[in-house]
Amino acid sequence: MYLQFAWRYFRAKKSANAINIIAWVTTGVIAFATCCQVLVLSVFNGFEGLVKSLYSSFYSDFKMVPQKGKTFTITTAQLEAIKKQPFIKGVSLVAEEKALLENDETQAAVVIKGVDDNYAKVSGLPQKIVSGKYNTGTAENPKAVIGYGVQNAAGILVDSLFAPATLTITLPKRNVTSTDPMNLISQGNLQASAVFAIQQEFDNTYIITNIDFLKQQMNFAEHEFSAVEISLLPGTREAKALQELKRLIPENTQLKSRYQQNSNLYNTMRMEKWAIYAVLTLILVIAAFNMISAVTMLVLEKKKDIGILQAMGSPKTSIQKIFLSEGLLLGLLGAGIGISLAIIICLLQTRFHFIKLQGGSFLIDYFPVKLQLTDILMVAGTVLLISFTASWFPSYKAARQPLDLK
């Protein structure tokens, strides 16, 4: 009933055109702000999904790392217990260290990562090869899969028509006590077999090679590793898997999810998303002042109607609800128009990619968008909250004005 009164008041001709103008301006500002909010949140969702897809090609679902230091020890029995879990897709052992790469007279600082044969089950890197063939070799004949940026920095040629480039890697040794500095480092040769391209952070830094070769060069103990990477079967509940695995891992280690491995990046993206949302919410707050004016002027316009309702015995709360509904109606109308426009724009962008990214240095040349129901509900809820707050005071005053039928 109250919304029917509010709708009739909204549509009815007023004695002053300013009331209609202010009402429609308020609706338009709310529509513009809600449209911008949904679009911005959808773009951030799109970029977040893109970044996650890139990082998921390199990072596993879980990564076991030492709580202190660079390495830890894990027994064969502990590894087997982890592998036997029904939700496990793959488990890969990792040795990792910073190193100096030399190709003839060219040098580059890299991170060399030794992996076993199960690495393809926990990482999407083997599917990101752009030149050559993924092959990490053996301890006796080690090969290197290098990042695209490392290839350019060190001038490494990877081409099936030419002999593979021989690279020299210089590494620190572990578990060595010597006063001779030369005994604390090791050098080994390996051949470039392939080039991968995922994302600049990885492409400019990493070399993937055979774990047995790297453990020999660094003088690792038999069961000593830098990390254990674990992938889950599709549909596995991550929280439940994490709880189960924590019971099986060594005491001096910790498990990190994909999010925790990149917490700084994800936290920064979320902060930027909500900061922009807060700025756009200020537009709604500005629109609230117009709403206060619109409802206040409507109260003055309908002073005689209020007096008639009071004379008929209508309670104050009912009169307040009528004008409160008027403010909510303006908010609902504006939010409906804005959200509808945003959905249409997002669907068109998803289908036709008509809004382009500038610069030409991105993996894609258009703005990625991803609509989420939670974002739409949150924007609508924000509009209703601001509309309720803005229209409460003038509706409260309307319900408590003295009876006057003149």
Image (cartoon, grey):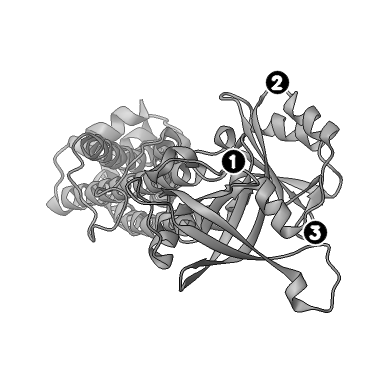
Which residue is at the far top? 86
User: From mark 3 to mark 2, how far is it between C-alphas?
Assistant: 30 Å
Residue type at mark 1 is Ser
Question: Which callout, 1 or 3, points at the residue further toward the start of the chain?
Answer: 1
Residue 132: percent from left, percent from top? 39, 44
The residue under the point 57% across, 43% down is 137
| Quadrant housing the C terminus | top left
* Amino acid at pointer 3: Lys
Picture coordinates of residue 351, whole percent (x, y): 22, 34
Q: Are marks 1 and 2 in contact (CB under 8 Å)?
A: no
Q: Which image quadrant for residue 111?
A: bottom right
**Crowd class of label 2 (few under 14; some 14 to 19; many from 20; radius 10 Å):** few
x, y percentage for residue 245?
76, 34
Q: Regarding mark 1 in the picture, which secondary structure is present there?
A: loop
User: Disc 3 on helix, strand or loop?
Assistant: loop
Where is mark 3, residue-wise? 68
Residue nearer the viewer, 356 or 171: 171
Residue 260: x %, y % from top left: 63, 49
Which structural element holds mark 2? loop
Residue at image x 42%, y 58%? 200
Q: Residues within 10 Å of mark 1 (few under 14, many from 20)?
A: many
Residue designated by label 1: 60
Front residue of 216/279: it is: 216
Residue in the foreground of this view, choosing between 6 and 239: 239
Which residue is denoted by mark 2 in the rendering?
86
Quadrant in which residue 350 is drawn: top left
